[in-house]
Image (cartoon, rainbow, N blue to C red):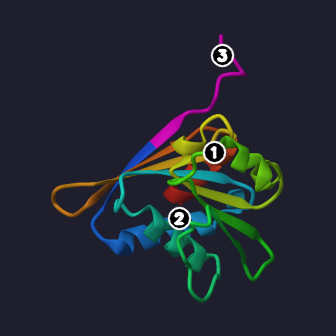
């Protein structure tokens, strides 16, 4: 008997040969209506390509101009031409849980808009479960192994757009 309370877990593994593959994934996700209020967690070592992926995704969503990493600011807000609110978090330097409440992050995650978080493990227990977790690993041959993990029905919808 199936338990309707178990989380959805679906995975897909990709191999990126270069930045064009990063752009292809970003464009596919950007085309999905499920992306609008999604929370995407980005995992990987320094230099794996998390911020590069976010830049490609933001460009695919119509963000123009300089897209800077929120490493020091913790969050960089953006607004797509269609009005979509986008929040790019980088929790690499996040250390004080009080900062979560003081900065209003709880409200951001509870509200509408796309949330992208690098180093989400540093805010563990504060963020909701990610709809889609993306783990990027740099390989010795300069390719990237990319594992996508859907944790929710929205995450499954995002994975489905990659097969289309």
Residue 17, compared with residue 134, is above or below; it is below
Q: Residue at x 53, y 46 (%)?
A: 133
x%, y% of residue 36?
A: 73, 61
Measure the C-alpha gap from mark 3 to mark 2.
42 Å
> Residue 96, which numbered label?
1
Q: Tell which circle, 1 or 2, labels the residue nearer the N-terminal end.
A: 2
Name the front one of labels 3 and 2: 2
Name the front one of labels 3 and 1: 1
Look at the image and say whether residue 7 sits in the magenta stretch: yes
> Residue 141, which numbered label?
none
Q: Tell which circle, 3 or 2, labels the residue nearer the N-terminal end.
A: 3
Q: The residue tagged with tag 2: helix, strand or loop?
A: loop
For the C terminus, give its image quadrant: bottom right
Q: Quadrant of residue 72?
A: bottom right
Q: Tell which circle, 3 or 1, labels the residue nearer the N-terminal end.
A: 3
Q: The residue tagged with tag 3: helix, strand or loop?
A: loop
For the N terminus, give its image quadrant: top right
Q: Residues within 10 Å of mark 1 (few under 14, many from 20)?
A: few
> Residue 71, which numbered label?
2
């Amino acid at each position: 008997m199936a338990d309707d309370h178990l989380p959805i877990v679906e995975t897909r593994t990709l191999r990126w040969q270069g930045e064009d593959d990063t752009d292809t994934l970003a464009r596919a996700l950007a085309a999905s209506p499920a992306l609008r209020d999604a929370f995407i967690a980005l995992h990987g070592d320094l230099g794996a390509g998390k911020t590069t992926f976010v830049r490609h995704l933001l460009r695919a969503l119509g963000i123009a101009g300089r897209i800077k990493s929120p490493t020091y600011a913790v969050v960089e807000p953006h607004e797509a031409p269609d009005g979509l609110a986008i929040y790019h978090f980088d929790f690499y330097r996040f250390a004080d849980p009080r900062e979560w409440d003081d900065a209003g992050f709880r409200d951001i995650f509870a509200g509408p808009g796309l949330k992208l978080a690098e180093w989400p493990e540093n805010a563990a227990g504060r963020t909701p479960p990610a709809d889609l977790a993306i783990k990027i690993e740099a390989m010795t041959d300069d390719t990237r192994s990319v594992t996508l993990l859907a944790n929710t029905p929205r995450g499954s919808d995002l994975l489905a757009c990659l097969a289309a």
